[in-house]
Image (tube, rainbow, N blue to C red):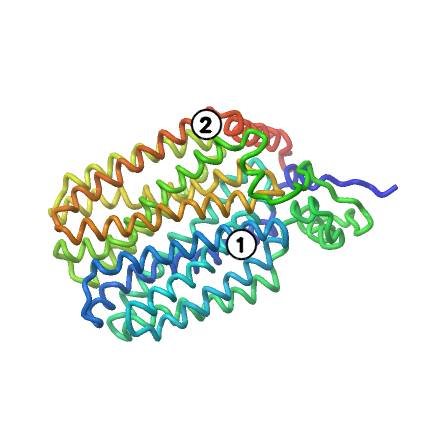
Amino acid sequence: MRQRISIDEVIDQAPVGLYQVLIVALCLVVELLDGFDLSAASFTAPAIARDWHVSPASFGPVFGIAFFGMMLGGFACGTLADRMGRRQLIVWATVEFSVMSLATAWAQSLGPLLLLRFLTGIGLGGALPNVAAISAEIMPRRLRATAVSLMYCGIPLGALAGGLASAALVPAYGWPSIYVVGGVAPLFVAALVAAALPESLRYLAVTGRDPARIARALGRIERTGRYTADMTYVSADRPVAGVPVRHLFRDGRALPTLLTWVIYVSTLLSIHFLSSWTPTILRDAGMPLGAALRAAAFLSGGGILVTIVTSVLLDRVGLYRTIGAAFVLAAAALLAAALAGRDLGLLLVALSFAQPLSSGIATCVSALAPALYPTPIRSTGIGWANGVGRIGSIAGPLVGGFILSVTFSGINVVYVFVAMVTIIATVALIALAWTPTGRAADAARSTARAAGEALRVPAN
């Protein structure tokens, strides 16, 4: 009789080693490129508006259309990955947004720019749920939230890199140079993913595929030779029948799924409004273009520090307590930005808290869906949460463009609006924490962490 090996037990009980860290790091690099290409439009908008003699407010649709593409990409690739596997969808999506970014460098008017940003968004949205799923499934449950949120640091890192690159390249070589960089780099990373990134072991076990590949990977995790291709590898999760999306609303998941979507919509609305319009707002408030781009980049990059701090707390203090506290602080900072009005100094001080907090929250919120859903529907759950969340990404830039097109004094109204959205997310998070599925996800994380601490043996 073939020996049965539980993938969950092996991964959850083994110490985290270099192999797992490198997998999460490679996923982080994919997200870094995602953040770079996603932020490219906001950092190049002032230069494009100047070259094409159009109003900066007309870029609201340009910002929003990429998020609409991300929504469709998340829906499609998240669902397909639970049928086909995560790895090949990551490769396809990375190549797709690479090619579309390169093509954007040759756009000559708003019409082609809109189309190319939409197509770029499909690839960006397709990569995201799958790198999140692989990062979650290669790590023990006790560190899953930390791993996923740290992996999402790639997005603010990419935004920071995009801002710094824009400040250096746009004045010297023009705005197309940013899209060339954002198109060439992902091609190399796609090749690296194809060569080095393994398929999710939990996914392979659930679907009963490729025991030889599972054996090799488990040997790298435990650094033993006891796993072989003739063993049967199993998972506590079971395959689901029919369309995976249906299972997001079965077995008590309907209300948690809807509440999670509200949180994702609210969070993505806040962060993508701030990242899209901050360079333009700062420039209109009197800051030179180069300085506005650098300031916006560092404000986005500040989210990396917030993410690192909150990521450590996610698995120690708890998902809901950590994210909830960050929501409250972000809302207070946004209200302070509203009170600052046109005072550039006060506005920068308020935004130095509001934007990093909002960016850090966005990465931590991304740990909610991986915690709520089991392996057979995890990519679907992440993809649909992020896809529905793109409604907020689309609405944020469009609402901001409308307010700023009416009057610059509307900047006060803008930040009050975003603060209220953050408060709505806080209420939804509290409700999610009280649902049975939400409590079970947090309890499982706490139990796994306690078990992991108990398994540690001091070195002799």
Numbered badge on residue 225: none
Residue on which the image places disc 1: 77
Name which quarter of the figure residue 183 lies in.
bottom left
Of residues 110 and 81, which is closer to you in this image?
Answer: 110
Label 2 close to label 1 by CB (< 8 Å):
no
Chain-order first, disc 2 or disc 1: 1
Q: Is residue 31 above or below residue 439?
A: below
Residue on which the image places disc 2: 433
Label tally? 2
Classify mark 1: residues with Cα within 10 Å, few (<14), some (14-19) or many (20+): many
Q: Position of residue 284 (x, y in %)?
A: 14, 56
Q: Residue at x 34, y 62 (%)?
A: 40
In the displayed structure, does residue 204 sit left or right of residue 101?
Answer: right
Q: Residue at x 28, y 71 (%)?
A: 109
Please name the amino acid that badge 1 sits on.
Cys
Q: Is residue 259 above or below residue 52?
A: above
Please name the amino acid that badge 2 sits on.
Ala
